[in-house]
Amino acid sequence: MNVGAGVLADAEKLLANPEACRHDLRIALHQTAKSLGDVLRVAESRGARLAPAEEEQLLADTEDEPPRPTS
């Protein structure tokens, strides 16, 4: 199990516990926010590497389509 999956599982367990204390909820929120930050950094990094190829494909796809009517 990767770190993000573990954080998510812990947060889900904690949120399902109606007796969870404020301190534990704050810790879970901090860990979840940190994991989300990591995910966003990876996605941004991968997106930056993939963007030129995707843009070229999008341009090629739109050149083959008939013009869309404007409203």
Image (cartoon, helix red, strand yellow):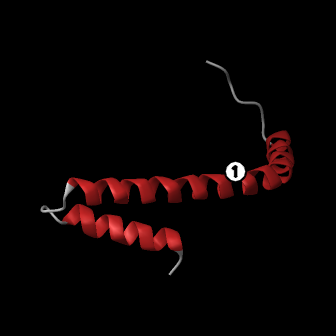
Q: Which residue is mark 1?
A: 44
Q: How many marks?
A: 1
Q: Residue at x 82, y 45 (%)?
A: 55
Q: Would you place residue 63 above or below residue 3 in this image?
A: above
Name the outermost residue toward the left.
19
Most foreground residue, 24 or 55 = 24
Q: Residue at x 44, y 74 (%)?
A: 6
Most foreground residue, 19 or 69 = 19
Name the quadrant containing residue 46: bottom right
Q: Residue at x 40, y 66 (%)?
A: 8
Most foreground residue, 65 or 9 = 9
Q: Label 1 neighbourhood size at 10 Å, few (<14), some (14-19), many (20+)?
A: few
The percent position of residue 33, horizontal first and vertical second, equals: 47, 52
The percent position of residue 44, horizontal first and vertical second, equals: 69, 50
Left or right position of 24 against 7: left
Q: Would you place residue 16 above or below residue 43 in this image?
A: below
Name the quadrant containing residue 31: bottom left
Check disc 1 and report its element: helix, strand or loop: helix
Left or right position of 43 against 33: right
The image quadrant where one finds the C terminus is: top right
